[in-house]
Amino acid sequence: MTETSTGRRQIQAPAGSPYSRILGFGSYRPSRVVSNEEMCTMIESTPEWIEQRTGITERRWANADETVMLMSKRAGEQAMERAGLTPDEVDTVIVATVSHHQTTPGLAPQLAQELGAGTAAAYDVSAACAGFCYGIAQADALVRSGASTNVLVVGVEKLSEITDLTDRGTAFLFADGAGAAIVGPSDTPGIGPVVWGSEGEAAEVIHTPMIPDYEGEGMPKLHMDGRPVFKWASTTVARKTLDMLHRAGISVDDLEVFIPHQANNRITDAMIRTLKLPEHVTVARDIKQQGNTSAASIPLAIETLYAEGQGHSGQIALIVGFGAGLVYAGQVIVLP
């Protein structure tokens, strides 16, 4: 027991790991593939126009049995297995989502129970398409502070339930899926400092109506004013990617993989120009077959890179998410 100069007992501070890293990823992709041709039976458009404007050729939609819980559980189980952990070794669960429609309790405590980690600290994060990067930043801080040892971060969405199929400007964008990562202790840096922020004055450009204000059947539908979102992501967020590299002490030439939120290929192209990415940098383009899965898009894109032989253990990667809020977040990571 130690005392301060006043004679009072001194609080014992937790001691964490000097660094953290991602130990393993997991994912779940729904069974239904919805092509641009099928989308054009629901909205007035053409497959060519959709692909030209977004890069999307098809997207995944979950069926009734593929709930946010099921998708989260499958992705979480895979991440734990790849990290070599059992559920009782996971002491914190963070779920990033905007499509768990029960305001309380959160999805995370229920997911922890389903996974067999029922005593873990657990909470949800509502940061839309930046949610996964928010979760990674928090997991990194928790491990380094000593508050947690192994943190499961899940990004999961079932956006097909809140997609407005009468809106020909956005109906073809959104999709479903789950991605997960385990963050644990490390002797060397595996997660760089987060660069994050918000612009709440633009909150209305991406939103769902409050339940009392909603008139209609089913769930309130997601609204997005695409033009200002595109401009913000292509300029403000693109410039922030340079800060993410700088804070991690990484140059553009050091970077090996770039994994932006899979929102729109034209936004990705704008970020590439801002960063002046060298040709050797692999760029994730998972949006082509997956669509925009909000909080799930970054881990799903990483999984695709691994599957296609373009992502490898030890590579230095930049991840960045941005979306409703408006919020953004990103950091440099070492791929597990």
Image (tube, helix red, strand yellow):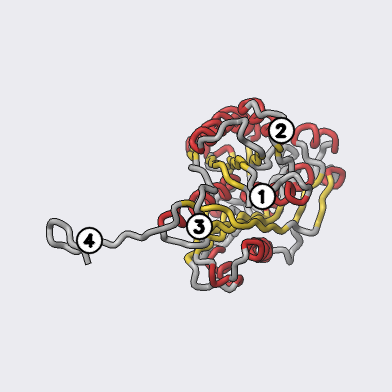
Read off the residue under disc 2: 280
Judge whether 264 appears above or below 119 on screen.
Answer: above
Read off the residue under disc 3: 185
Cα separation between marks 3 and 2:
30 Å
- Which label's residue is closer to the chain start, 3 or 4? 4
Classify residue 152 by image quadrant.
Answer: bottom right
Tell me the number on the disc at residue 10: 4
Cα separation between marks 2 and 4:
53 Å
- Which label's residue is closer to the chain start, 3 or 2? 3
- Check disc 3: other Cα within 10 Å, few if <14, some if 14-19, many if 20+: many
Give percent across and percent down for residue 286: 74, 44
Give percent across and percent down for residue 248: 51, 38
**Could you tell me the amino acid type at mark 1?**
Ser
Horizontal arrangement in the rendering, residue 182 relative to residue 46 (left or right): left
**Could you tell me the amino acid type at mark 3?**
Pro
Residue found 63% across the figure and 52% down from its top: 336
Q: Nearer the viewer, residue 128 or 84?
A: 84
Give percent across and percent down for residue 290: 75, 48
Q: Secondary structure at mark 2?
A: loop
Which residue is most to the front? 187
Read off the residue under disc 1: 313
